[in-house]
Structures are given as C-alpha cells and as structure tokens.
Amino acid sequence: MHAPRFLTPVTIVLLGLSLGACSISLGDGADSGSPATATATGAAEDRSTTEAALEDSTAEDATAGISDPDWLAVLEDEEASEVVSGEYTISTAMGTYNLTGDLDSLTIEGAMNTVAAGDVGTLTISGADTVVYVRSVETVVLQGAGITVHYLEGNPVVSDAGVGNTVVQEQ
C-alpha cells in the first residue's frame, strides 16, 4: 500500500519546519562575541550604513533645488516610483508616477495624471488636467487642456496646441 501523493510533500514541509526551530552551537558558548561573529555583524552593519547613505544621497539629488511641496510629495511616493530610460508612454488616467532616470521622450495620453520625471528630451501631453514636474526638458508639446508643466532647469521650446495650459519654471 502506498501513501497518498500529497503526504510526502507535507512530511517534507513539517520536517523542515521542525528542524528550522533547532539550533546548533559549536564550542563552549562562553564567547558569543567571537571575532568571526563581530566581523560578520560589522560587515552587515557597514553594508547597511553604506546602502542607507547611498539611498539618502540619491533622494537628496532627486529633490535638489525643488521646493514645491506637491512635487516633493510625488518624489517621495515610493509606490509611484519606477526606473525608466529611453522612451516612456503613460496612457492611463488618474495615476501618479515618479519616473527615475533620463528619457529621450515621455508621452502622456491619459487624463488627470501627476507625473514627476528627471531629464526629458521631448515631453508630449495629449491628455487633460495633467500636472507634470520635470527637472529639465528640451521640448514640450501640449495637445490637451488644463495641463501644467513645472520644470527646474533649462529653457524648453514649447508648442501649445491646446487650451488653458501653462509651462512654468520653478524658482
């Protein structure tokens, strides 16, 4: 007689869980702060400190020169963050996007979006009621209504075929 097919995987999982609760100690245990333990812990702490410092400096670079609280809120929204490059298109509505990276072109076709981006070659927006924050942009093409583009650096060439749109340099 054979055991049911599911019994073997269940047995393996239970065995793994029971062994996972066990610990093995080598040596007399009197010196829990052995050099090997201290080195491993120190390396982990150094790596964590280095990673945290890198993340802090990257976050500071992303927000350098920006004082607009709405722009800063988008940059701090981790759920909206996405690393991008080349060409990128947004064709949804009512989204928040924090695009990290340089883009040759950014096209926004949806309505009521809020977008933050780094350096963009050509920004094309054909939606409505959209707010875009870019560190720098070379060309802005507006084909929608109620669009606001905030930029930090540069002097973009603007083509506005829409209604009620604004392009503003942040101070």
Image (cartoon, rainbow, N blue to C red):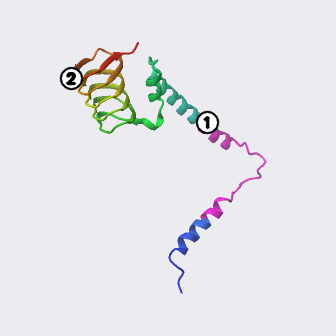
Tell me the residue at 67%/40% (across/down).
38
Q: Position of residue 9 (x, y in %)?
A: 53, 70
Tell me the residue at 42%/35% (across/down).
81
Mark toward the viewer: 2 or 1: 2
Residue topped by disc 1: 45
- On screen, residue 34 versus residue 127, left or right, reads right
User: Disc 2 versus disc 1: distance between alpha carbons?
Assistant: 55 Å
Give the answer, above or below, for where 91 lies relative to 53.
below
Give the answer, above or below, for where 78 lies relative to 19.
above
Q: Which mark is residue 161?
A: 2
The residue range painted magenta reads 16-44
SS under mark 1: helix
The N terminus - image quarter = bottom right
Q: Residues within 10 Å of mark 1 (few under 14, many from 20)?
A: few
Q: Residues within 10 Å of mark 2 (few under 14, many from 20)?
A: few
* Nearer-the-camera pick, 30 or 139: 139
- On screen, residue 29 versus residue 3, left or right, reads right
SS under mark 2: loop
Q: Amino acid under label 1?
A: Glu
* Nearer-the-camera pick, 58 or 92: 92
The C terminus - image quarter = top left
Q: Amino acid under label 2?
A: Ala
* Nearer-the-camera pick, 19 or 148: 148
Q: Position of residue 98 (x, y in %)?
A: 40, 32
Q: Position of residue 169 (x, y in %)?
A: 35, 15
Tell me the residue at 36%/32% (across/down).
113
In magenta segment, residue 32: yes
